[in-house]
Image: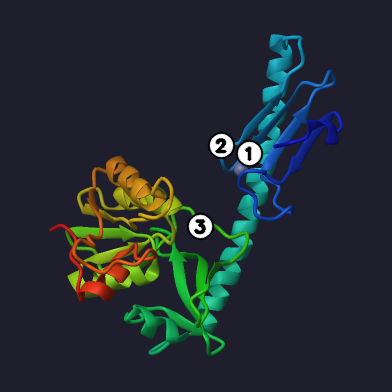
Amino acid sequence: MIDFDEYTVGDHRAACPACSKTPRDKSLGITILAHDHGIARCFRCDFVQLRREQRELSPAEKLAFQRRMEALRRQHDAEQRQRHAEVALAAATRWKAASPVDSHPYLSAKGIQPHGARIEAGHTLLVRMSDVHGHIHNVQSIAPDGVKRFMPGGRVKGLYCPIGRPSGRLVVCEGFATGATIHQDTGHAVAVAFNAGNLLAVAKSLRAKFPCITLVIAADDDWKTEGNPGLSAATDAARAVGGLLAVPNFAGLDRGEKDTDFNDLHRLSGSVEVPA
Ligand SMILES: [Zn+2]
């Protein structure tokens, strides 16, 4: 929650209490009017907080409020575009400097092939994050112990790592190891969307690029997480693009709490299938 008393009359930018990971992130716009009416609105998530006094705002004041918040949003969007462009340049440079990889502890641990991933500084695996035109905007780094990171401040939404060439069917999933397993076991082309929150944006971009292809959204079944975010995001994405939903079926297997995706299923069962 925002404490409006901390802000003077006027317009401000601040970190969002709902979605910002660092205090330096200024995704929240705050507008305080002279008589203490105030609004805080996040330009990235759906966080909104109002401060209302007894008196109703006049139509002119409401309009002024809206215009000032719009100006803050434009400022935020311009800064974000600038940051995204800087990170995209740095990502392309890192990608070019990295080398093709044959073996890596993460690939061995997951039982997967590199599928175009590269290696940086002899130990960090890099996975490309491209748009539908094939342009790299960011990279996911995977340390030998499996810790994954995006480049801070870079774009993530709508970006994916392509594995294989789409023909008739294209599978969208969350993680690189999951995508590699699905491609290896089924031969289908895969788009790795990196996390549940990005499945919808990636599925929509791919639907626009391939209007006639069958899209299959391969869910992570977060069975031990409240609300099952993986399954619910995959269901939404499949619905939005008229795609199929594939859920890993662990029935009859000795499933651990952390077994959620098709890579885990392969480890337990030896192979995976997605609907044909
Ligand atoms: Zn937010």
Q: Secondary structure at mark 3?
A: loop
Q: Residues within 10 Å of mark 1 (few under 14, many from 20)?
A: many
Ligand 1 placement by image quarter = top right
> Which amino acid type corresponds to the residue marked 3 in the rendered image?
Val
Residue annotated with mark 3: 156
Asked if residue 155 lies left or right of residue 166, the reply is: right
Query: How far is mark 2 from mark 1, CA to CA?
Result: 6 Å
Viewer-nearest residue: 39 or 162: 39
Q: Picture quarter containing residue 130?
A: bottom left
Q: Earlier in the sequence, mark 3 or mark 1?
A: 1
Q: Position of residue 272 (x, y in %)?
A: 20, 68
Residue annotated with mark 1: 42
- The residue lying furthest to the left in this view is 276
Say whether marks 2 and 1 touch (CB < 8 Å): yes
Q: How is the image coloured?
A: rainbow
Q: Residues within 10 Å of mark 3 (few under 14, many from 20)?
A: many
Q: Is residue 204 visible?
A: no
Quadrant that contains the N terminus? top right
